[in-house]
Image: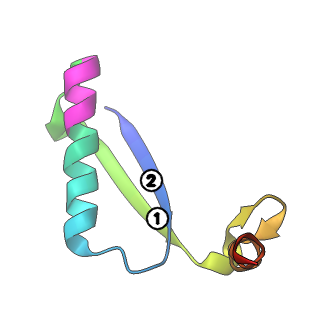
Amino acid sequence: MPYVNIKVTREGVTPGQKAELIAGVSDLLQRVLNKDPSLTHVVIDEVNLENWGVGGLPVPQYRQRRTT
């Protein structure tokens, strides 16, 4: 029973995009590892930008530095 946890920043990921991620990951596990999609669990966590860090900075600050 595979379990996949996808974490994305909370920036308007639509229900359709989430459904596509779930189907795509389930498909991939079936194709590559021969796992039954009906037993594959996919969880998508949305994380606030201020709770996600890159390069030692919260994402908003990191992005601001990259644009200046």
Q: State the residue at coordinates (40%, 60%).
A: 44
- 19 lies above or below 40: below
**For the magenta stretch, what is the residue range?**
27-33
Q: Is residue 31 magenta?
A: yes
Residue bearing the label numbered 1: 45
Q: State the residue at coordinates (84%, 61%).
A: 56
* 68 vs 60, nearest the viewer: 68
The answer to whether 17 appears left or right of 57 in the picture is left
Quarter the C terminus occupies: bottom right
- 7 lies above or below 35: below
* 42 vs 18, nearest the viewer: 18
Are discs 2 and 1 less than 8 Å apart at CB? yes
The amino acid type, in three-letter code, at marker 1 is Asp
* 57 vs 31, nearest the viewer: 57
Which quarter of the picture shows residue 66?
Answer: bottom right
- Within 10 Å of the Cα at label 1, are there few (<14), some (14-19), or many (20+) other Cα atoms? few
Circle on res. 6: 2
Which quarter of the picture shows residue 59?
Answer: bottom right
Q: Give the spatial CA distance, label 2 vs label 1.
A: 6 Å
Kind of element beneath mark 2 = strand
Q: Position of residue 33 (x, y in %)?
A: 28, 19
Quarter the N terminus occupies: top left
Q: State the residue at coordinates (25%, 32%).
A: 28
Q: Position of residue 2 (x, y in %)?
A: 35, 33
Q: Position of residue 23 (x, y in %)?
A: 19, 48
The answer to whether 51 appears left or right of 13 in the picture is right
The answer to whether 28 appears left or right of 59 in the picture is left
